[in-house]
Image (cartoon, rainbow, N blue to C red):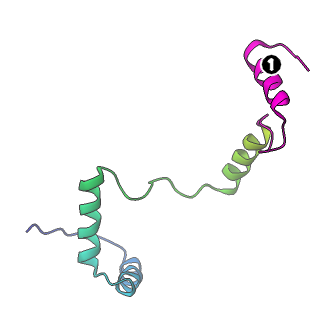
Amino acid sequence: MGMLAVRIDDAVKMRGTEIMRKSGYTPSSAVQELFAYVVKNERMPFERDEKPDDRAVKKRLAALSALKAPAAGVATDEEIRAMRIEERYGIDVR
């Protein structure tokens, strides 16, 4: 069996170990689980992206609000048909 050494901040190590133990893991078993997951799924079990800041959240919300799609269950079939014709052909049939 191979051996792995990592450098990690002492405070992070202590807090992480405490949380792992509450879940029934040791740091070694948690790392083994991580590697097993990565090999099985060929990807990490989490995203690398950091949590977006307030500015990024506001920008995403503004983009979402700008979408022309109606709320679910609000438009009738005829309204949806008219919107699709307008989107595809640029013709307003309302």
> How many residues crowd around disc 1 within 10 Å: few (fewer than 14), some, or many (20 or more)?
some
- Residue at 30 percent across and 52 percent down: it is 41
| Location of residue 77 with respect to 64 vertically, above or below | above
Instruction: Tell me residue 9's x, y (percent).
Output: 37, 75
Q: Residue at x 74, y 50 (%)?
A: 58
Examine the image and state in which quarter residue 85 appears: top right
Where the N terminus falls, by quadrant? bottom left
Residue underneath mark 1: 86
Q: How many marks?
A: 1
Res 93 → quadrant? top right
Q: Residue 92 at what x, y percent from top left?
A: 87, 16
Name the foreground residue: 25 vs 55.
Answer: 25
Quadrant including the C terminus: top right
Q: Which residues are magenta?
A: 67-94
Tell me if residue 89 is in the magenta stretch: yes
Question: Would residue 46 be seen by someone viewing this image from the given angle?
Answer: yes
Is residue 6 shown to the viewer in this render? Answer: no
Residue type (three-letter) at the residue carrying disc 1: Glu
Above or below for 10 versus 48: below
Question: Residue at 49% of width from left, 53% of height from top?
Answer: 49
